[in-house]
Amino acid sequence: MLVVTKDNFDEVSKEAAKLLATLLRRKPDCVLGLATGSTPLGMYKELIRLHKEEGLDFSKVITFNLDEYVGLPPSHSQSYHYFMWENLFKHINVDPRHVHIPMGMAENIDEFCQWYEEKIEECGGIDLQILGIGANGHIAFNEPGSSLGSRTRIKTLSDKTCEDNARFFENKDEVPRYAITMGVGTIMQARELLLMAGGAAKADAIKATVEGPVMAKYPATIVQLHQFATVVIDSAAASKLDGSYSGF
Ligand code: GLP
């Protein structure tokens, strides 16, 4: 695992965008695993800039998002569909037919999850998976206790996650209780992982992820077992680490 610590979150976003852009230039038809939340926003802004100012081409890229709330239609302002189109897709030249985001309104969720897994496989697997991290150590919506071998499925959100995400809704009661999420095992099959985090609120989760034992209580700790995982964090998120990691 490569841990890269940056002075501030702006640099984290730029570093992450640089890594993604490097892959895209090397493999224009790469398969990207994308994330939502506040963490990747700065990276998406930088990718939009690279597209507009430097012609970074997304026309052949295939994307798969990590997760989506159950019961929110794509038009809902807090759905991850809406998030992705507003914050990235509508600003770049991605082919809408190449975009995959779990369907929170799927009639048969189990069948949908199976289809999502098969689709990832059919597209050749994910080349680079972007990850944020929950303050409780979740990745995507794989909450503490998730099987480390899990596949795409429906999960109940923890109280902590509902509280953390309540800031995006009118109140905590409006946060959906269920989500469709890629599993920990699905994520681990990506050829490369890029986990980003910023801020002191993530310091405990980052300490567990980088230095703690691998355990289902902190699903993010699984990244220690990935052959090509990069963790890019700011100094606040790195503040509880014992080791010093110089990165690149
Ligand atoms: C959400 C998402 C995760 C994300 C996490 C952190 O629950 N499902 O994919 O990594 O929360 O969010 P943020 O980046 O806003 O801190």
Image: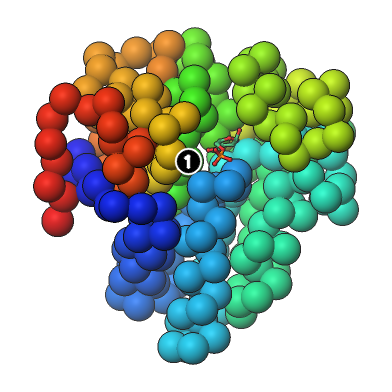
Which quadrant: the N terminus?
top left
| Residue 31 appears in the picture as rendered | no
Kind of element beneath mark 1: loop
Snapshot colouring:
rainbow
> Residue 121 appears at what percent x and percent y?
49, 47
Task: Name above or below for residue 123 compared with residue 231.
Answer: below
- Mark 1 close to ligand 1, CB under 8 Å: yes
Q: Residue at x 81, y 36 (%)?
A: 169
**Residue highlighted by disc 1:** 132
Horizontal side of residue 177 vs 165, given as left or right: right
Q: Quadrant of ligand 1?
A: top right
| Residue 201 appears in the picture as rendered | yes
Q: Residue at x 87, y 53 (%)?
A: 75
Most foreground residue, 62 or 195: 195
> Residue 25 appears at what percent x and percent y?
35, 77
Most foreground residue, 196 or 140: 196
Most foreground residue, 15 or 146: 15
